[in-house]
Image (cartoon, rainbow, N blue to C red):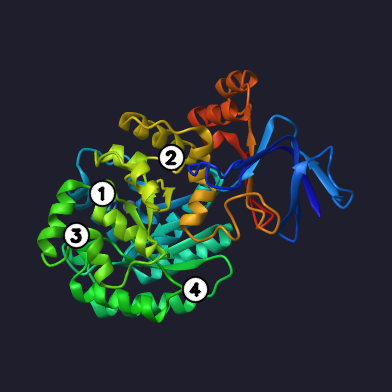
Amino acid sequence: MIIYRGRVFTPVSDPFVSGEQPAWAYFRGGYVAVERGKIVSIGDWKTRSERIAGETVDFGSESLLTPGFVDTHLHAPQVEMIGSFGGHLLEWLERYTFPTESRFADPEHARRVGSFLFRELLRNGTTAGMIFSTIHQEATDIFFEEAESAGFRGIIGKTMMDRNAPEYLLEDAEASYRGSKALIEKWGKHPTLRYAITPRFAPTSSPRQLELAGQLKKEHPECYVHSHVSENKAEVAWVHELFPDAPHYVGVYDHYGLLDSRTVLAHGVHLTDDEIALLAKRGGRVAHCPNSNLFLGSGLLPLRRLLEAGVLVGLGSDIGAGTTPSPFNAMADCYKVQQVRGDVLNPFQLWYLATLGGARVLSLDDRAGSLEPGKDADFLVLDLQATPMLEARTVHAESIEDLLAGLIFIGDDRVVRKTFVQGREVSRRI
Ligand code: GUN
Ligand code: ZN
């Protein structure tokens, strides 16, 4: 057993649900005891049980131990195009995204980007995430290998597209089905990696391709479904033209059997009440990507409406429309977007969305998302004095709520001193 000492903060339940208090635990002089990659116990060091004994690593009271962050939506191939400015979604895809993704036909390029990306995510404190690849089977295979070698808990999928994009990014529906299936067979039973059936979004898949994606889901019900929905008004109008018989955008995915509790749809900014009700009924989840929604000018998510309808929501960086992998930024932008909508979120709610809430969205909460006995030891050591500004802020923090607020709005990758996944140190600040 190894015992890590420091301040310890973890969400334990949903702070958006009143009456479920307390939704978090905090120990100023705390510890996390880890054995064979799992958390044995956490608590107050002074009042620990005698059974908590072993090698001790003390990070001191200027450190905060907290669960690894969960990024519920990002695009591996888009890291090198962050900040491509000027267009809204559909122009941005045509002008920058499709040409960038074409480069992943080259396995060496995929290897270089994959090797960088997973280490960069861990360095930022993200230990788990749901990830788009490109249409390329080999590049997707390489992303799986790189996630495995970095120690990242990834849910990854090969993008399915067979229309409304340049020829070089299209693949016929049958080939895309076969390529996805081969990857499911290779990676589907991995201990920490999972497969997501990944139609890019309704406009780039023909009805036949969506049908085959639904068939894959039937054949492999344990697989996730990862796509986009209702991000941008022009996109929504286009979906109505392309699928005139569907009741709405969410209804397209539902028609093809792509909607269940393993479905994660990015954005959902412009969802109607009917669509939200259908998502809730099927158990589908939404990845909220506030940085991307601001960057592309897509809109402001009605977060509270989704949560109140019973739809689970997590945070996503949506790299490369999002401009940073940092979960601190995702929390801060989430706060600001809701502020503009007139809805005030507190630090516990923001931290929950970025950790346990995200793990619930990805159905990983039996193993990750919080520091609780029996879960895998996926945790971070945050440095409360990482920068002069942060030090100035934390010195005056009057409560854990105030301390978390300081981290959310001032924090970035410099705060993350160490990252552990399954008890193994996978990243350390140099
Ligand atoms: N909708 C379809 N593809 C994409 C993408 O790559 N990024 C974003 N933000 N939205 C999309
Ligand atoms: Zn996206």
Q: Is residue 32 at least partly visible in the picture?
A: no
Sequence order check: which comes first, mark 4 or mark 2?
A: 4
Q: Is residue 48 above or below residue 211?
A: above
> Of the numbered discs in the image, which one, if any, rests on residue 330?
2
Instruction: Please name the residue shown 54% across and 37% down the image.
Output: 348
> Of the numbered discs in the image, which one, if any, rests on residue 138?
none
Sequence order check: which comes first, mark 3 or mark 1?
A: 1
Disc 4 target residue: 187
| Residues marked 2 and 1 touching at CB (< 8 Å) | no
Q: Which SS class for mark 4?
A: helix
Sequence order check: which comes first, mark 2 or mark 1?
A: 1
Which x, y percent locates residue 173?
24, 76
> Of the numbered discs in the image, which one, if any, rests on residue 231?
1
Mark 3–mark 1 Cα distance, whole angstroms, equals: 14 Å
Q: Which SS class for mark 1?
A: loop
Sequence order check: which comes first, mark 2 or mark 3?
A: 3
- Which of the image's four quarters has the N terminus? bottom right
